Image (spheres, rainbow, N blue to C red):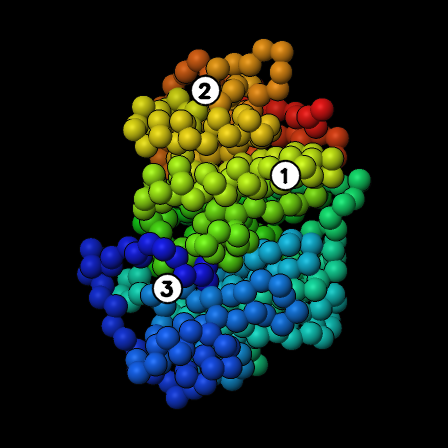
Amino acid sequence: MRHTLRFALPLLAALGACQTPVPAATDAATANDAAGGDAAADAGKDPTFAALRYTPTGCAHSVRTEQGSYMNYRDDRTTFGPMATPSAVHVSWPAEPSSTIAFLWNTDSETHASVVQYGTSRMMLDRTATGHVSTGASGAAQITAHEVHVCGLTPDTTYYYRVGGEGHWSEVQSFKSAPAPGRTDYDVNFAVTGDSRDSFAVWRMVQERMQSVTAMRQPDFEVFSGDAVLLGTIQDAWQQWFAAATPTLTRMPIVMAHGNHDNLAVNYLMQFAQPQNDSEERSELYFSFNYGPVHFVFLNDTARDPAGSIAGTQLTWLRADLTAARANRAAVPFVVAVHHKPAFGSSRYTNDDEIAFIRRTWPPVFDEFGVDVVFNGHEHVFEVSKEIDGMGNEVSGRRGTVYITSAGAGAQLYETGMRTWQRYSESVVNFCMVHATNRELVITPYRGDGTVIEQGRLTRTPRM
């Protein structure tokens, strides 16, 4: 994430890590001036810590380095350190999925080159883009992340790319841009996973199984419902998480909901580029976007100030976003919400005060605006609710919202429970595959062994 956030980042002292300034490089101030960023606000300070803020070439959105980051450089092509080979290479969307993409990767802190070559042929990467690099934290938490944004892509097109710089390129990978908005013949697939934590072998297996059960038609992207690692401030865990998901994440954009174990850590915030919201916070912790026939709404239920965010800023934004989505429902018929902690789970945390607070706040709005499905994590089981209203009561004679917990991508499984709102619950490694057209949204949950959880199948049709 690249936007100044209105909360303090987690303290690293608990890890025995103090944030020690790195000596400033001679071009740091120049890079900030060229970026039109926040260097002026840091006049008289070490330019190593000056933030960057810029609009990538051809883009309508802005980019800002994360609060607390340092060694912020932009548009470097030639500076390489001893470990310049890119790792944790992945792609995601910073804006409209049919025309934008963000490339992200990690290196050592001495490597400033942030270059991408891309094109529509594997043998002819005839376009080049540059971005920025930042370092955050130190000790076990230290992270150096590169980020390059590209806009103006052709919808529904396969692109090939490599990242790094001359002499230090990654392998050539590919991704496909989303279909153009406004079509009537959408046919898209996406996967839903969550709660991998530090079981990297299981996380790898889930990624492999996702590909095998879909045979020749791979998911277009992956939705993750939070808690990627056990502790978000340990960078080695993130490196293992990305490694276990290779090559999936090099070609399939992943969209993240923040989980409590991700801890609002700079490691989480720096390693994912996601759509922005239109609030004053300008954060990427809650946002929305359209992909084909689905409007996605991502929320952050682990805010530092729940009353101010969950029931304040986010709630206001959510109502405005769903109002706009309702007006556009003829073109984008389905609405899917994603956040980490399930309001209507039935396992370990159902009676927690924080869950009850979420339950009172967001589901009534989901019900009011006709959200079709809500995906959650946190409870390490698979669960699917009945069609329920915003209070958790089964509806009769009208459409309700279905809540699905898919949180079994590696974290230790919990025992199942059963509440009146629950249709089915199973303690099992799991993930979901979703097929969406203009006519229906079909959700098929799978166990880790590749068998279908038949009791969890769900088909939604457009609301009338």
Residue 405 at what x, y percent from top left? 47, 30
Q: Earlier in the sequence, mark 3 or mark 1?
A: 3
Which label number is shown at residue 391? 2
Q: Is residue 394 visible?
A: yes
Task: Please give the residue where the numbered disc 1 appears in the rendered image.
Answer: 325
C-alpha span from label 1 to label 2: 22 Å
Q: Residue at x 72, y 58 (%)?
A: 158
Relative to 226, say whether 244 is above or below: below
Where residue 136 sits, quadrant-wise, is bottom left
C-alpha span from label 3 to label 1: 31 Å
Secondary structure of the residue carrying tag 1 is helix
Secondary structure of the residue carrying tag 2 is loop
Nearer the camera: disc 3 or disc 1: 1
**Type of amino acid at the residue the image marks with label 3:** Gln
Residue 399 at what x, y percent from top left? 62, 19
Q: Residue at x 52, y 14 (%)?
A: 394
Q: Residue at x 63, y 39 (%)?
A: 325
Q: Residue at x 67, y 31 (%)?
A: 441
Q: Quadrant of the C terminus?
A: top right
Q: Residues within 10 Å of mark 1 (few under 14, many from 20)?
A: many
Task: Please give the residue where the numbered disc 3 appears in the rendered image.
Answer: 67
Q: Residues within 10 Å of mark 3 (few under 14, many from 20)?
A: many
**CB contact under 8 Å: marks 3 and 2:** no
